[in-house]
Amino acid sequence: MFGPDPLSRSLAKASRRIGPVILMYHSIQGGRAVPKWLWSVAFNRFLDQIDLLRDAGWQFRRVSDLTGEDASDRCSLAITFDDGYRDNDPAFLALERRGIPATWFVVSTNVGRPAAWSDDTTTGWPMLDAGRLREMAQAGMEIGGHSRHHCRLAELPADRLPDEIRGCRLELEEILDRPVTSFAYPYGSYNQAVVEAVRDAGYRVACTTQYGPALADGDPLRMRRLAVYSHDTLSSFARKIGLMRNEATWGRVFEHLAATMLTQRR
């Protein structure tokens, strides 16, 4: 593994004063080659990222843990996977071997069935099946909801929200035989009506796709996440954690350092 440059590494370590942090993954594809889909991360690169976080001293949690006693632990970090693609299986096994918990947000009607939402890239991709989800939950992984049909929830009429949101929880609980208390908004699409529907459905925490520290908004149903992209190097990965931004360019780094220096001089 070629580590991040020293400045990027130091930024990632310094960000432990800002956390908790939630990372957002989707697909994990075999090998080290950069996948074509923005939301796919090469498996070997994923392992490098996890090892970097562990070496930096981050404490791994499930999303639902971040609102309990660990909410004040700024070194807490949650790894999340959206959709429930079957190619996540090696990532699950690798995390299990390392004793690292993570959270999967699953589209309930596609458990064990090919992806069916309107995305030309992933339509037909195989998904994790019920047996594997049960094994993951038994291994300490968290399984959360991601709606029944991967809809843009903010665009749905209010009378359809309970079916998509509460229905997802009920279907997953039937599969897992345990409570499902976490949720992620598909496409990051939500509004106040959606948040209220998530609360009414019995979820305790929910994740958006907005970047920043997880609890920046002070609302467990609007938890922020940092997106991990296919092209992220270890250095850019470390910088995005350090800056709490999805796009952590060197320009952003210098802006951050300048702002920090001005603050310290006041």
Image: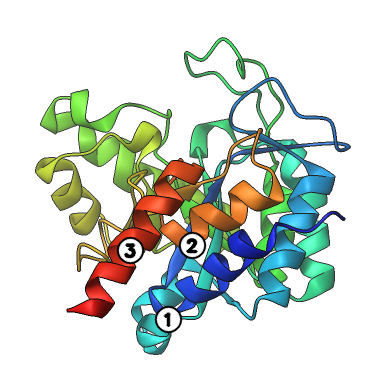
- Residue at 42% x, 35% y: name it: 148
> What's the CA distance linking mark 3 and mark 1?
18 Å
Horizontal arrangement in the rendering, residue 219 relative to residue 28 (left or right): left
Earlier sequence position, callout 3 versus callout 2 = 3
The front one of 117 and 173 is 117
Amino acid marked by disc 1:
Arg
Among the 4 quarters of the image, the one containing residue 18: bottom left
Q: In the rendered view, tell whether residue 59 sits above or below residue 166.
A: below
Query: What element does badge 2 sit on?
Result: helix
The tag on residue 215 is none
Single out the mark in the foreground, 3 or 2: 2
The tag on residue 242 is 2
Query: What element does badge 1 sit on?
Result: loop
Residue placed under numbered mark 1 in the picture: 74
Horizontal arrangement in the rendering, residue 20 relative to residue 91 (left or right): left
Horizontal arrangement in the rendering, residue 25 relative to residue 136 (left or right): left
> What's the CA distance linking mark 3 and mark 2?
24 Å
Q: In the rendered view, tell whether residue 38 sits above or below residue 23.
A: above
Q: Position of residue 255 (x, y in %)?
A: 35, 52
Q: Residues within 10 Å of mark 3 (few under 14, many from 20)?
A: many
Q: Position of residue 154 (x, y in %)?
A: 20, 31
The front one of 58 and 190 is 58
The tag on residue 205 is 3
Residue 170 seen in the current view:
no
Among the 4 quarters of the image, the one containing residue 164: top left
Query: What element does badge 3 sit on?
Result: strand
Q: Residues within 10 Å of mark 2 (few under 14, many from 20)?
A: many
Amino acid marked by disc 3:
Val
The front one of 141 and 236 is 236
